[in-house]
Amino acid sequence: MLTAKDIMTTEVVTVGPRTTVEELARILMEHHFSGAPVVDEAGVLVGIVTEHDLINKQKRLHIPTVVRILDAFIYLESSKKFEEDLKLMLAEKVGDICKTDVVTVGEDASVTEMATIMSEKGIHLLPVMRGGRMVGVVGKEDILRAMTQG
């Protein structure tokens, strides 16, 4: 049975939290990646950023409906969601748009386990860890390649 160690990409292109959003877009297009791990200055994994995060940044901002009663403003929708969307729209650095709750796998994770995680959690890129350090990544294309190999 194939595992993460068998199919992972070991020469991982990473970005830092201070990488600009524009530079990230260039890197993803240049390498034909759907996402990249975000690492700090010490090379420690701190997040994942994907094409989806970049696309979300460009979406139309929905301003919530507000009702004014006397001197109070009452949001009919979540004001927190509006604040998050506004922050995302104004973001200039990867650290402002990346997901920090990263799902990872170990080298012995099976293709079935990784496919299940990707499907159930809507994840497209899984960092592969050994002893707390990232040693590779498995993407959707790696899973598809593994399926065709056997």
Image: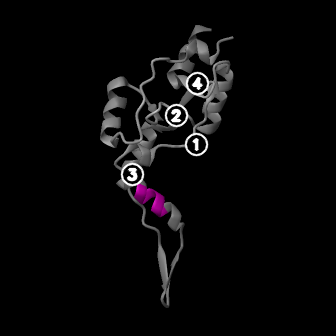
- Image quadrant containing the C terminus: top right
> How far apart, in angstroms, are the residues tagged by discs 3 and 2?
27 Å
Q: Is residue 19 magenta?
A: no
Residue 14 percent across, percent down from the top left = 43, 29
From the image, tell me which residue sits under label 4: 128
* Mark 4 or mark 1, earlier in chain: 1
- In the displayed orientation, state which residue is furthest to the bottom: 70
| Residue density around tag 3, few if under 14, some if 14–19, many if 20 or more, within 10 Å | few
- Could you give the CA–CA distance between mark 4 and mark 2, rounded to whole angstroms? 11 Å
Marking on residue 65: none
Which of pointers 2 and 1 indicates the residue nearer the eye? 2
In the rendered image, the vertical position of residue 12 relative to residue 146, given as above or below? below
Closer-to-camera residue (98/17): 17
- Name the quarter where the N terminus is drawn: top right
**Residue to which mark 3 is pinned:** 59
Question: Image quarter for residue 111?
Answer: top right
- Horizontal relation, residue 137 to residue 89: left or right: right
Q: Secondary structure at mark 1?
A: loop
Q: Type of residue at label 4?
A: Val
Residue 13 placement: quadrant: top left
Tell me which label, 3 or 4, sits earlier in the chain.
Answer: 3
In this view, the mark in front (3 or 4): 4
Q: Residue at x 46, y 38 (%)?
A: 49
Query: On the image, numbered disc 2 is attached to which residue?
Result: 45
> Residue type at mark 3?
Lys
Segment colored magenta: 82-87
SS type, badge 3: loop
- Mark positioned earlier in the residue sequence (4 or 2): 2
**Mark whose residue sits in front, 1 or 3:** 1
